[in-house]
Image (tube, rainbow, N blue to C red):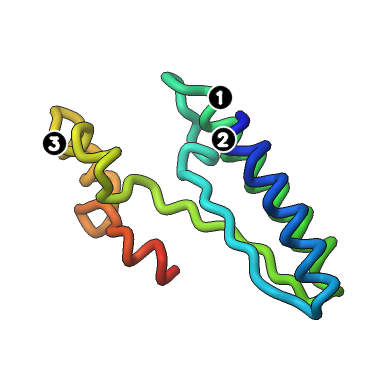
Amino acid sequence: LDVNLVGPANVMFCAGRRMAASGGGVIVGVSSRGAFRGEPDTPAYGASKAGLNSLSQSLAQALAPAGVVVGVVAPGFVETDMAAAVLAGPRGDAIRGDSPFGRVATVDEVAEA
């Protein structure tokens, strides 16, 4: 919860205040599809990402009058070093099969979102 919700909340509050005072800005949170479908093996992870989504929606409404846009991306699995072992293992094909593209996202695709 500290990494996926409390930390981002602290950054969003601090950045949001500063952006609002200086005329606007953009805050983008990184969530997960686990926020929407549940994570039976890691329920705190799914709950923290769902909390991040709710926090972002609340901050979007609160900060919009000051010109601050708040959004969230929830890319699912991304081709990273952290995900490499899972994607190379027995679950890899099923994970890729969950996507209409038949593959996982790249870091560049998430950055461009």
User: From the viewer's perspective, is 69 left or right of 49?
Assistant: right
Q: Which residue is mark 1?
A: 44
Binning the other alpha carbons within 10 Å of mark 1 as few (below 14), some (14 to 19) or many (20 upward) gives some
Residue 17 lies, in percent from the top left, at: 82, 62
Binning the other alpha carbons within 10 Å of mark 2 as few (below 14), some (14 to 19) or many (20 upward) gives few
Is mark 3 in CB contact (under 8 Å) with mark 1? Answer: no
Marked residue nearer the N-terminal end (2 or 3): 2
Query: Is residue 23 positioned above or below 47 on the image?
Result: below
Secondary structure, mark 3, is: helix
Image point (14%, 28%), residue name: 90
Image point (68%, 64%), residue name: 70
Q: Quadrant of the N terminus?
A: top right
Q: Which residue is mark 2?
A: 3
Secondary structure, mark 1, is: helix
User: From the viewer's perspective, is 67 left or right of 6?
Assistant: right
| Direction top: furthest residue | 41
Image point (65%, 70%), residue name: 26
Residue 95 lies, in percent from the top left, at: 25, 40
Q: CA distance from mark 3 to mark 1?
A: 25 Å
User: From the viewer's perspective, is 23 left or right of 26?
Assistant: right
Label 2 amino acid?
A: Val
Camera-nearest label, 2 or 3? 2
Q: Quadrant of residue 72?
A: bottom right
Q: Which residue is mark 3?
A: 88
